[in-house]
Amino acid sequence: MDPFSLGADALEQEDYVAACGHFEAYLQTHPQDADAWHNLGLSWFYRHEYSQAKRCWQTARTYTYEPELLEDTLFEAAHDLIHLHRRSLGAIPFLEMLLDSPRYGRKSHLFLIWCLMINDQIQESITQADAALKRYPDDLAFWLQKTFLFPAVYESPKEIAWWRQRFETSLTEFENWLDSAAQFDMTDVLTYSPIFNLMPMGMDEKETFKRISKLWRRLFVDKQADELKHEVSRSGPIRLGMVSASVWNHSTMHYFQGMLELLSLESDFTSALFDFSQREDGMTDYVRQFVHHNVKMTRELEPALEAIRAWQPDILLYLDIGQETLLYTLAHYRLAPFQCVTAGVPITTGVDTIDTYISSQRFELAEAQKYYSEQLVQLNHLMVCMRPPQLPDVLKTRADFGIREEAHVYFFPHTLIRVDPELDDIFAEILIQDPDAELYLIQLLNSDVHLQLQRRFGRRFPELLNRLHFLPWMGQPDFLNLLALADVALDALRLAGGNVSFQAFWTGTPMVTCPTPFLRGRIATGLYQLLGLENWVATDWDDYLQKALKLGREPETRRQLSEQILAGREQIFNRSEGINEIFLLFKSWAGR
């Protein structure tokens, strides 16, 4: 067999190393065979050598390889890297090759803008968004992308202010364009939640979210969205519908697991869980057993509306809204006489068809209503019944994580998008004032956000960079293990920990926190106050630093606080009082 045939056979048998060798041998004597260059590119691609694949496919194009087939290959390669392998950085060169394609140009622009944004190429992303709007001036998708474009992390407080101003200007330009546009293209709109990326800015977002909701309703919500198709049922159990896209081992389900267990014991309710999740695991199977009707949903609006309307809930509880575009859109419809949200959305929605936000006095200021578009209900008890996280039966040692036994371990246990720029100064002072300090964070899946943070920190504190460690993304057992091993857990400053705060209190690891006026910055504060340990809540960011150093450098102080947390954790976990308050509230709404 000739080398081309041998290469084709090796490619089919998924022996990509051999395929590369055979096609390269063939091209020595047939250097202008576009088909061979195409197949060699495939072989390199499947070996995850994306620069080599790009080189081969560019050469195939030079030798007039079938353009449509090559474009199909390039787009499929980019699509797989983004959606299957979570390697959006590798997809960028293939998308760039498709920008002038009549068939794939528009979609490639959409994906390219997003890939550039999440890979610390934010200025390039803005440039591409502007270029796309020049090419597709009446395309709604690019207006949405430009308006709601934000970096994964910010370089400085000044940059946060710049991005905020840019957002306000872009939103106004978007609204003005809508007012003047005779028509616009709404096909294949690829967008992300319009409210989630505003949360890390740490501002009062009520009026902004109301403005975004008004825009969203104008674009994506039927004129009849407020028309309720049914009334509250006056006999039989109360029909409680719940909506979520996080029915798996996700922080949202950690919040609601206990509530679902308790709900199954309530004869006054019949329940339905409308599950929009795109993944399943053991948590999925576990929580499904506690609802009467589990409805697996597709990511399509019309079937979702039809399914929920057909079930006719008396009360519709959204377990999460902010992270999902579809659920955010769905929330603008009146599908039940009473519609509400609680802990899974740690901020107001701004949506006028969400009637009530259920929170707790433990986590809110007395005047917190002013931050909510919904009617705020502050329960006397926790609005969640948290179950204890499952630590591994046998804990790993520090050595298993590559941590020095004698180090003072300061652990930032949150996703990296929560690393406020001011934390760089706090991290640096910890490392300077505590010579034994080592700071640990966890990489974000397959993203390069940790590289952005390394560069940000290294530009200002290059001499300390070797003591700032980013461990690979890990599963829940290892994460809880690491949290238990840490000396100090460090909370974020603007978008602070929720589920992670509960996990830290269960392991007895002291968390340093400084509250904001908003729910999303007050969970650890509320837990300390619940245990009578409010003196460990920082009064400002300087006090945050001092408390972190005190806990890191004083083992006896740390031990005493840890023991106090562990002794009081029964006041935090397995508490049903707040859930019973919610059930009573639901009964009052239904007139029972």
Image (spheres, grey):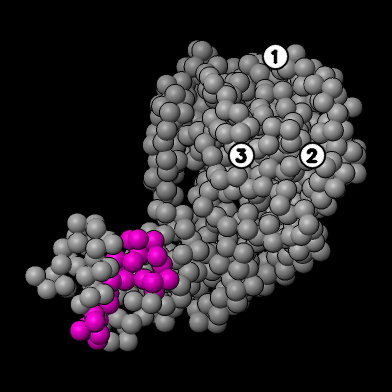
In the displayed orientation, state which residue is furthest to the left: 1
Residue 296, x across and y down, in percent: 38, 37
Which numbered dot is residue 402? 3
Q: Is residue 32 magenta?
A: yes
Q: Amino acid at mark 2?
A: Asp
Q: Is residue 86 magenta?
A: no
Q: Earlier in the sequence, mark 1 or mark 2?
A: 2
What separation in Å lies between label 3 and label 2 (alpha carbons)?
15 Å
Q: Secondary structure at mark 3?
A: loop
Which numbered dot is residue 436? 2
Picture residue at 67% right of the left edge, 22% below the top: 506
Residue for badge 1? 570
**Highlighted magenta segment, given as a residue range:** 27-54
Query: Which quadrant is home to the N terminus?
Result: bottom left
Residue 468 versus residue 269: which sits nearer the camera? 468
Which marked residue is nearer to the observer: mark 3 or mark 1?
A: 3
Q: Magenta stretch: dominant SS?
A: helix
Q: Amino acid at mark 3?
A: Gly
Using the rendered view, name the quadrant where residue 75 is placed: bottom left
Picture residue at 49% right of the left edge, 41% below the top: 245
